Image: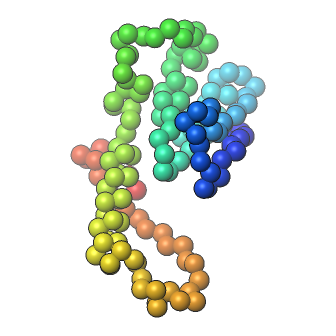
Amino acid sequence: MRFDDGVREGDAISPFYDSMIAKLIVHGDTREQALARLDEALAHTHIVGLATNVQFLRHVVRSPSFAQANLDTRPDPARRGRAVPAGERGPAPAAVAAVAQALLRERASQGGRPRSAAATAGARTVLVVRRFEFDFDGAGRAS
């Protein structure tokens, strides 16, 4: 597996630029093996802060027509407006929104800063790991 990208924190991507800012490359001895590796790599791809097509790509990779290289680029009127079937999107957007809301509330209750400037003077940067658990209508926990 190889991941190629050319964008770093602070870079700006013009709307006139190619929308492919990164690519994931896999290889296998057979198409079936390569597709399995691609699906696994996509399953472990987590990008925060911008919209991606990772779920759409997983849907495509798992489709029988893609697996059999029986492809057609013409639009399918039956799928118009549905890049990924609703049942396959998962609860991730709701979880991200809930965590963001909880952190914003916490920050607001602390005057906009987690610690005072005096408390952080000369302090080292410390990584803080937080855990949030969700139960989506009994469908299982996500954290």
Q: In this rendering, would 26 be left or right of 50?
A: right
**Image point (50%, 86%), residue name:** 120
> Can the viewer see residue 54?
no
The percent coordinates of residue 58 (x first, y second) are 52, 31
**Image point (37%, 23%), residue name:** 82
- Residue 102 or 69: which is nearer the viewer? 102
Q: In this rendering, would 120 be left or right of 3?
A: left
- Residue 70 or 8: which is nearer the viewer? 8
Question: Image quarter for residue 123?
Answer: bottom right
Q: Which quadrant of the rendered structure holds the N terminus?
A: top right
The percent coordinates of residue 77 (x first, y second) are 38, 10
Q: Which quadrant of the rendered structure holds the C terminus?
A: bottom left
Q: In this rendering, would 89 be left or right of 1?
A: left
Question: Image quarter for residue 35?
Answer: top right
The percent coordinates of residue 51 (x first, y second) are 47, 41
- Residue 31 or 26: which is nearer the viewer? 26
The percent coordinates of residue 20 (x first, y second) are 62, 34
**Image point (46%, 11%), residue name:** 75
- Color theme of the render: rainbow
- Determine whether 114 is above or below 79 in the image: below
Q: Residue furthest left?
A: 137
Q: Residue furthest right?
A: 29
> Can the viewer see residue 102?
yes
